[in-house]
Amino acid sequence: MTGIDSEELLGVAALVSRLERETLAALEPPLTSRQYRLLRVIDQGQVTATTIYEQATISLAAISQSIDLLVQRGLLHRTRDPEDGRRFILSLTDTGRAALTKADAQMTELAVRLIGEPDEQQITELRQALRALRERVVPLLRSAEPSR
């Protein structure tokens, strides 16, 4: 890489990931990063584990395990799909929606603490850089996943 070394990029990514994990773990109820992301996806509308898997970069087994735990903790409803009895529809419970609202607020606060109050041009540039990075990271994760 020209102009940037691996520690500069990966070291910051690891630190941000640690901050995210610690912030989510300190919530009541505590969440993992994966659980938080699942709640966000499910909040967009009723979905199935398979739908999440098709969009995710983690295995169906890991998704199912996280969903099982969120159901046990009362954050998700899992109901049989009336159109296909083999599938389950996932939706947030009131407790899950409250946990997500609290987590979103903490993640927004964390983002503001990390980047400050950028102007519109800086926000646009940051979003473009993050999208470009994501477009490179996701295929690498998918190709590294043995069970996909």
Image (cartoon, rainbow, N blue to C red):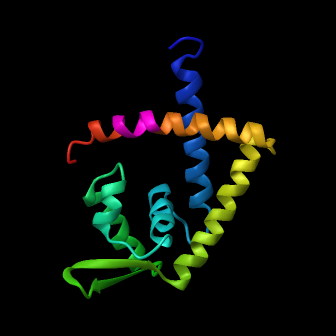
Q: Is residue 22 visible?
A: yes
Residue 64 showing in the rendered view: no
Q: Is residue 7 above or below residue 128?
A: above
Above or below 124: residue 38: below
Foreground pick, 128 / 59: 128
Residue 79 lies in quadrant:
bottom left
Image position, residue 77 (x, y; %)? 40, 82
Judge by depth and name the residue closer to the eye, 70 or 136. Answer: 136
Q: Residue at x 46, y 64 (%)?
A: 41
Q: Residue at x 32, y 64 (%)?
A: 51
Residue sticking out furthest to the bottom: 82
Is residue 71 shown above or below 118?
below
Judged left or right of residue 125, residue 66 is left
| Residue drawn where x is 55% and y is 35% of the image | 13
Q: Nearer the viewer, residue 4 or 44?
A: 44
Q: Is residue 52 above or below residue 77?
A: above
- Which residues lie in the magenta part? 135-140
SS assignment for the magenta stretch, majority:
helix
Residue 12: percent from the left, percent from the top? 60, 32
x, y (%) of residue 98?
60, 77
User: Residue at left 44%, top 57%?
Assistant: 34
